Image (tube, rainbow, N blue to C red):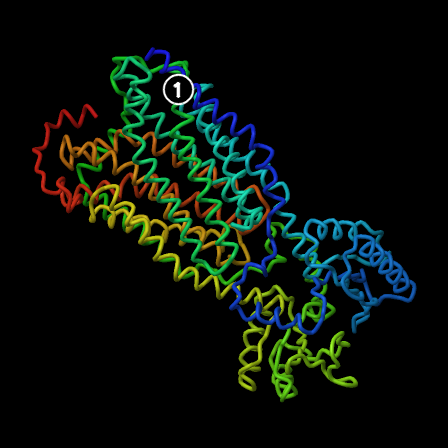
Amino acid sequence: MRSVARWIVPAVVALLWLGLAGTLGPTSGKLTEVQENDSAAFLPDSAESTRVTELQAGFRTERSLPVILLWESDGGALDEATLAAVGERTGQAVAVAEDAGALVGEPSPPVPSEDGAAVQAVLPVDPDLGDGLGELVAELRDLPGVDGTTAYVTGPGAVFSDFADGFSGIDSLLLIAAFGVVLLILLVVYRSPLLPLLVIGTAGLALVVSLAVAYLLAREGWIDVNGQSQGIASILVVGAATDYGLLLVARYREELRREESRSTAMRAALRQSWEPIVASGATVVLGVLCLLFSDLGSNRGLGPISALGIAFAMLAALTFLPAALVLFGRAAFWPFRPRYGDEQPHGRGWGRVATAVGRRPARVLVWALAGLFALAAFVPTFDADGIPLSEAVRGGSESGAGQEALARHFDAGGASPATVIAPADGWEDVADAAAGVDGVVGVAPYTGVQAGPPGAAGGGPVEVDGLVRLDATLADAPDSEAAQATVADLRTAVRDVDPAALVGGSTASDLDTQGTAARDLAVIVPLVLLVITVVLALLLRAIVAPLLLVATVALSTAATVGVGALAFDHLFQFPGSDPQVLLIGFVFLVALGIDYNIFLMTRAREESRRHGTREGTIRALAVTGGVITSAGLVLAATFGALTVLPLVLLIQLGFLVGFGVLLDTFVVRTLVVPSAVLLLGDRTWWPSRLARRRTPEEPDRELERV
């Protein structure tokens, strides 16, 4: 009866997972339907631009996203025939927008530039079109050209469409790249055709179920999801589930050489593996949930969906994978099956590394720390002042080229002015102050007809609740750093005249996003470090060891950012970095980087009980070297899959996390942590009983055997 149960229980667990994934599979594919990709919606209510948007609604004006049609002469001024053709194309474009139900106001007629070499027309489109915006921009670009000119579809609407297009196919492309590279690494590591499929299948099941649950929560409005957070969370699930699977498989293979029964071997493997896997997962879950304290909705949305993914990755690695491995038994490792009674091979290479670190820990620690501090010295050069949306697509975009062409002939910010809301008393003084700001080329009051109670008579500004609206035209493109600097100066100038004056608009939203991201970095970084320190203290039953591990990972993260500063500026020549890259990169680097230290130190603690701290640490490094290195390569390669996308933000995030994981794997876990523990000795485990234990060192031949 007991032998039958040994088969039935694993079979039931495996079938439950397969049935659950099969049922929820169609639901997981619906997550894109509930994405919220409007960046302005992610700002807090306290942001100045958000308050301006709310007040602006009182002027009964439709919210719009300008799409600019631009025709630039191939040489010289445009003649009458060309201008007539431009007028005809403008009419066709308006008809296309009307057919799509996209217009929310009157389109402008064709307006020639002062130099006569270009013509522009502005279409005010509905900002809530969703996927329809991309379809509209594509249709406008398919219109016939005008001889003698180069046509562009640009402006804020087209820029946002091109950026969103970078997310098109993100799920399938990312998953194909991620699963492909993971499969390749696992085939090399295991040299088995079946075992990699079981590990990848575990990651796939966790991903399907987590995305389905995320869809249900997002549909009910409990969490926010955008294309960026969904893509990053998917990569995180694949990498984490594979890492947990690698740890369990390595321990199971050890136990199969000690135990004849596959079930007994799995029970022993789970007994030794569940604690580091749960601790590792809890570290990542709590780390990403710290993003809930962000003031940016995009960051808050990333926290829950990532936490969900990690939770299901842990659950699948501790239930489905053990069940599948028990069902297949030693056949899962074919053709290199572990046989009962075989000697435990831990790899001579890692044994030699462990012995070398044990011989001269002080020298190893000094040189490793010197290298990390040297790289970290470049952190102040990291440019996190933001990146224009028109330059956020790697290799450029038509809208970006159009923005450059627009700036050659017009005021680049003409279609998206800054909005000033000021008290009606003395608004002229506010307007004069705004007009005097460098980078502002014109200020005009809003004089539209109010649909409600009578406003200002004649041609004066519309007054609503004692407020007037002023539109300030900027000289620079609305998504540029120069425009943001102008808006910052504009806010200072108008408040010097009237402290109640507010400045909003798309550029102001970008500026507020920068400030909010800086605030998030200052709040969340120490919070993540504190949470992870507490988790490690509970896991290791110590205080010194957690402080050591967190300090080393923090230094590794700083070194990674320093390398990123050099690579982004000199190697990739990026125009800058989004401040969110630093925050998300830090959270992932610390939460994921600590994983390998957890795998190492839990084994070191286990070995130290039997052999003392020195011998236990050397044994742990030798025994875990192969599996942790494999896990690091898998996770780095998984995040490296982000670089296949054309979006600068995701390329930078993939580089930072991938490089940082490798640095943790090969330097921090291999050199820094073991050498520091060897120098600290039993004090590492203070105040646990291990810190008071004094075990005589075993003969050197024991080291050689490891």
Q: Decide if residue 336 is in sight here.
A: no
Residue at image coords 9%, 38%:
693
336 relative to 698 in the view: left or right? right
Direction from residue 594 to residue 41 in the image, left or right: right
Q: Nearer the viewer, residue 69 or 375?
A: 69
Quadrant of the image occupied by residue 681 = top left
Residue 493, image x, y percentages:
56, 82
Q: Is residue 680 above or below residue 581?
A: above
Which quarter of the figure is the C terminus placed in? Answer: top left
Q: Which residue is drawn at the image coordinates 30% and 41% (left, top)?
A: 597
Which residue position holds label 1?
9
One can see residue 99 in this view: yes
x and y percentages locating residue 525 in the rendered image: 37, 56
- Where does residue 357 sit, x and y in percent of width and height? 22, 37
Q: How many marks?
A: 1
Q: Position of residue 632 (x, y in %)?
A: 39, 37
**In the shown orientation, is residue 50 left or right of residue 599?**
right
Relative to the observer, which residue lies in front, 643 or 23? 23
| Residue 143 to residue 10: above or below | below
**631 with respect to 479 (left or right):** left
Which quadrant of the figure contains the N terminus?
Answer: top left
Label 1: state its secondary structure: helix
Q: Amino acid at mark 1?
A: Val
Circle 1 residues within 10 Å: few <14, some 14–19, many ≥20: some
